[in-house]
Amino acid sequence: LMKAAKLAPDALLLPADCLVDGLPTLQLDESATKRLLLGQTVSGQPTALASAPMVRAYDPGGRFLGLVREIEAGRFKPERLIRTTAE
């Protein structure tokens, strides 16, 4: 408990994507990341077949961007994006 008290509060938090770690992931390139953050649809292929209506989206550096919904084969629209600080 003493060690935990000395850590910064953020060090005790779990990553935001831990709640949706069962969903497939979609790794985006720089261009697609910019488009997604502007609310535009993007193309991509999730790491696994998307049996769920949504998948997790990540930028090229592995930063969790939020959830995207597949609107047609290989096309995704932003559903719930989160604001995170760039590393």
Image (tube, helix red, strand yellow):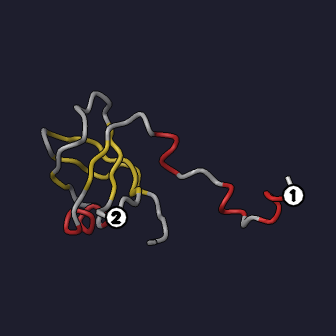
Question: Where 86 falls versus 51 (above or below)?
Answer: below
Q: Which residue ends up furthest to the top in the rendered image?
A: 51
Question: Where 21 falls versus 82 (above or below)?
Answer: above
Q: Which quadrant of the view contains residue 69?
A: top left
- Residue 52 in picture, x, y percent from top left: 32, 30
Q: Which residue is mark 2?
A: 61
- Residue 26 in picture, x, y percent from top left: 27, 48
Q: Of the residues shown, which amino acid type is indicated by label 1?
A: Met
Residue shown at 12%/38% (left/top)? 73
Q: Is residue 38 left or right of residue 32?
A: right
Q: Of the residues shown, which amino acid type is indicated by label 2?
A: Gly
Q: Is residue 68 left or right of residue 72?
A: right
Query: Callout 1: few (<14), some (14-19), or many (20+) C-alpha neighbours within 10 Å?
Result: few
Q: Which quadrant of the view contains residue 54?
A: top left
Nearer the observer, disc 2 or disc 1? 1
Q: Which residue is mark 1?
A: 2
Residue shown at 17%/49% (left/top)? 44
Residue shown at 64%/54% (left/top)? 13
- Residue 10 in picture, x, y percent from top left: 66, 62
- Marks 2 and 1 sit apart, C-alpha to C-alpha, by 34 Å
Question: Who is closer to the viewer here, 71 or 29?
Answer: 29
Q: Which quadrant of the view contains residue 81?
A: bottom left
Question: Who is closer to the viewer here, 5 or 83?
Answer: 5
Q: Which residue ends up furthest to the bottom in the rendered image?
A: 86
